[in-house]
């Protein structure tokens, strides 16, 4: 596909990431902002490649991205998604809203144009399987004092889930969950569940989400 120099210059000036794919979901063009987002070198040849062929953190979501592209082409409408992945040179977990719209060359539908904007405010069930979390997310446990299972339990406690619900989520006995909570309080020198919750929030530990509970790609319309 031949793109005009005026169109390319216009996209090159965008502050936000954008790009163009053909009707087979192969890249035709990406602007410098998208290269920075995906940490792709300025000389990396994007043309003709699929998402899964790129040396990016998002390559494993090729099927989801292609399904979204197809939805745009089939409906001839703009569609959007929330993408939460490690982006940029430092691979920082960030949330972006990606918009995709049909791209026409004359009267012929020739591809999908996409652009992204930083995600500011989210409704529930965007970031995680079980509810909303802060925009700032920590992927690594803030301290090694607690075990992986203890962090899982505290994740749900901080979301306001009951012990009974947590036992169901994690396939544990109710008494087992209580024992884990007792161990957490003992390790941290705390005496009640409310004190534990306040302690975690004061430390900023409520921003930690075990990676297993993060939705990385979600179509929102």
Image: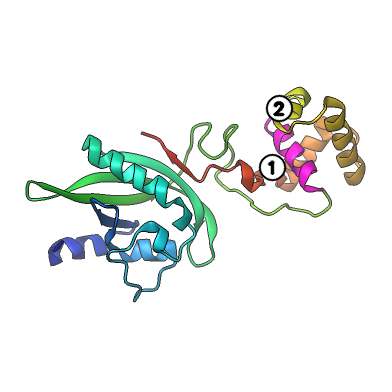
Q: Which mark is residue 161?
A: 2
Question: Bounds of the magenta span?
Answer: 147-160
In-image side of 110 versus 66 (left or right): left
Give the residue pinned by disc 1.
Answer: 206
Q: Earlier in the sequence, mark 1 or mark 2?
A: 2
Find out whether residue 191 is within the magenta segment: no
Helix, strand or loop status at disc 2: loop
Residue 173 location in percent, x, y? 82, 27
- Which secondary structure is most common in the magenta stretch? helix
Helix, strand or loop status at disc 1: helix
Residue 177 location in percent, x, y? 83, 31
Q: Residue furthest bottom?
A: 43
Q: Quadrant of residue 195?
A: top right
In-image side of 71 versus 220 (left or right): left
Find out whether residue 152 is within the magenta segment: yes
Dot 2: few (<14), some (14–19), or many (≥20) neighbours within 10 Å? some
Residue 186 location in percent, x, y? 92, 41
Q: Residue at x 25, y 51 (%)?
A: 113
In-image side of 29 versus 216 (left or right): left
Q: Residue at x 58, y 41 (%)?
A: 134
Q: Which mark is residue 95?
A: none
């Amino acid at each position: 596909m031949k793109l005009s120099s005026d169109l390319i210059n216009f996209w090159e000036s965008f502050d936000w990431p954008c790009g163009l794919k053909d009707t087979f979901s192969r890249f035709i063009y990406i602007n410098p902002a998208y290269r920075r987002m995906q940490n792709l070198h300025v000389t990396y040849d994007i043309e003709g490649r699929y998402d899964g062929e790129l040396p990016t953190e998002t390559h494993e979501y090729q099927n989801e991205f292609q399904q979204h592209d197809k939805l745009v082409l089939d409906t001839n409408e703009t569609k959007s998604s929330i993408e939460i992945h490690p982006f940029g040179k430092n691979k920082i977990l960030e949330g972006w809203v990606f918009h995709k719209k049909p791209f026409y060359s004359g009267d012929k539908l020739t591809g999908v144009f996409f652009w992204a904007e930083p995600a500011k405010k989210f409704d529930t069930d965007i970031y995680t399987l079980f509810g909303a979390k802060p925009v700032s997310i920590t992927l690594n446990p803030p301290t090694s004092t607690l075990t992986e299972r203890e962090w899982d339990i505290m994740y749900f406690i901080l979301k306001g889930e009951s012990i009974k619900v947590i036992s169901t989520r994690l396939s544990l006995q109710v008494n087992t969950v209580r024992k884990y909570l007792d161990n957490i309080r003992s390790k941290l020198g705390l005496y009640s569940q409310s004190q534990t919750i306040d302690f975690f929030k004061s430390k900023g530990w409520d921003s930690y989400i075990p990676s297993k509970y993060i939705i990385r790609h979600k179509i929102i319309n």
